Image (cartoon, rainbow, N blue to C red):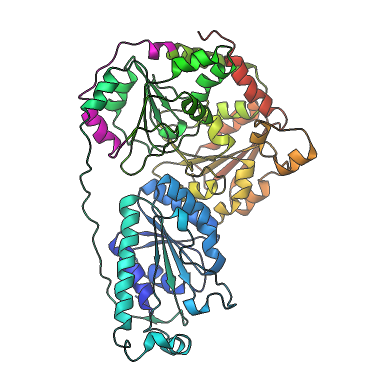
Amino acid sequence: MRYSSIPSAQLVVQHCKAKKIKNIVISPGSRNAPLTIDFSEDPYFKCFSVVDERSAAFFALGIAQQLHEPVAVVCTSGSALLNYYPAVAEAFYSGIPLVVISADRPIYKIDVGDGQTIRQDNVFDRHIGYSANLKQDVSHAVKRVEKYKPEWLSEENKDTAQQEIQDYNDSELNTSLNVALQIKLPVHINVPFEEPLYDTTTEPSVKAFIIPIRDKEELDIPDLQNYADIWNTSSKKIVLVGVNPPNEVEQKFLDVLATDPSVIVLTETTSNLHHPNFFTSIDSIIAPIEKSEESNVLFEKLRPQVLLTFGGLIVSKKIKAVLREYKPEHHWHIDELKAFNTFFALTYHFKTDVNSFFADFMNQIEPQSSDYFNYWNKIRLQYEIKREDYMKQIPFSDMLAFYNILKSIPKNQHVQLANSSTVRYAQLFNLDPSLEIFCNRGTSGIDGSTSTAVGSAFYAKTPTLLITGDISFFYDSNGLWNNYIRSDFRIIIINNDGGGIFRILPGQEETENFATFFETAHDRNVEHLSAQFGFEYMLVNGVTSLNDRLKDFYKKSDKPKILEVHTPRFINNKILLGYFDFISSRELT
């Protein structure tokens, strides 16, 4: 086995191995050659080669999302590192432990006009759990160090300089990787290397000093009796759940919440929580209230005394607007690490995991007599009936396409949703409880949906389906530029010839400027891209052809598949807005 001759490269790899960071996504380059050599030569690591750094970072994020463990990305110096930023920001807000390892030029070659050099230290500053800026070895490329930084090798410190550097680097590596493992945030490790970069040795020249992860400290959870008393004397309570990994919350706790007459549980597609009594389409409850002449009365009727939240960020803009305007008396959030004050009403943060909280809390609460659930459940059942009626009368469109696609997905699939219209349409329908749903909701960007899905699919135990829009797919088409796509990987692209969501937002006008700079109208399809990346391709433009293709789409094949669904550009917004009008034509009071 070969090792880089550069001590700091050896240290980085030894620390990753000691902390069981096994998956390494490498983008080819020269400055990162010492790291690439040590990672790829060691059979302990599973190394992936992904050329495009932006795609590589989202690919790694997808693996981390699937395995719930840190994944490293390794790049060369210069602007390559900046391409990681979208995924770093997503990881920061989603609590995903992405480990960014960047090779850098020596400090004396920064800002002197040398190629591929930028100020890489602390480059992610506001969106990182920890930045480790390692020191350059002085035992490597000694003549160059003597030429450019002779003070590093003065007679006074010549004998101790390299040991001090290793001690510092060990400390920084321990700190950064422990943050990734314990706090579940992305970290950045910047490693300067002087040439030569490709020299190797058959034995490591250093041994890393590893500080083990400390045992998890017992969190100081308050006596829950006071909170239970508030709960037990409140007749209107909402439990609202955002992004949540599948199978994380014990069903017995969910069943208690679902059968309490004073509780309504609002879940999102990304929550991966299920019960027949849960409200799965939040906007379908709120939109009719917005349109009602008695909206203020109805929102007061909906306003909870207690709002209990857990999980990640919320998709529904409507529920955020309502709870900000009609604030609860008490808003409690459950999470071991953080609590976003999304509704500007947070009164307590329970710093524990959801199951531990409910295991204690459920022993102290009792179902309350209330018509809260029954009242809103009648409305829920009414709009579900009206939704089915509406689907029977609308022409082929985004909404009808999503309705048929979501019904067609086989059980136990791993489903990745792109952002913008895709995740919002999915919110309107009931999905099969066996599906595992994922979406990059940390920053809610469209920039890495495909790459994330491909990375996540690599370790998924079941076939993966990515549902995406045309703009999102074209934007991240490099997500298919790798050799790790499984034959059971499926992509459905809703192509409405542009960013159709902008037609729904206020202020849209039928002008050339709107079509060019907001909607981004186009007449492209993905047939040639499908062929380039080795996918089977099929195109449909009607409900009959869509359903015919869906019958065979999920069957086993030698190649992955893309189904492009072309919908009419000019009617999608009208049909979606018409849906809310249609389900609003009923008595709410």
Residue at 40% from the left image edge and 21% from the top image edge: 304
**Residue found 60% across the figure and 33% down from its top:** 549
Magenta residues (range): 349-375
Quarter of the rendering containing residue 235: top left
Compared with 163, 322 (above or below) is above
Image location of residue 429, percent across then percent down: 51, 25
Q: Would residue 14 be seen by someone viewing this image from the given angle?
A: yes
Which residue is more in the foreground, 253 or 539? Answer: 253
Q: Is residue 518 magenta?
A: no
| Residue placed furthest toward the right | 512
Q: Is residue 204 visible?
A: no
Estimate the x, y position of residue 435 in percent, counting from the top left.
43, 33
Q: Position of residue 122 (x, y in %)?
A: 46, 63
- Does the magenta segment cover residue 354? yes
**At 43% from the left edge and 85% from the top edge, which residue is drawn?**
141
Above or below, 327 against 393 in this view is below
Q: Is residue 74 left or right of residue 338?
A: right
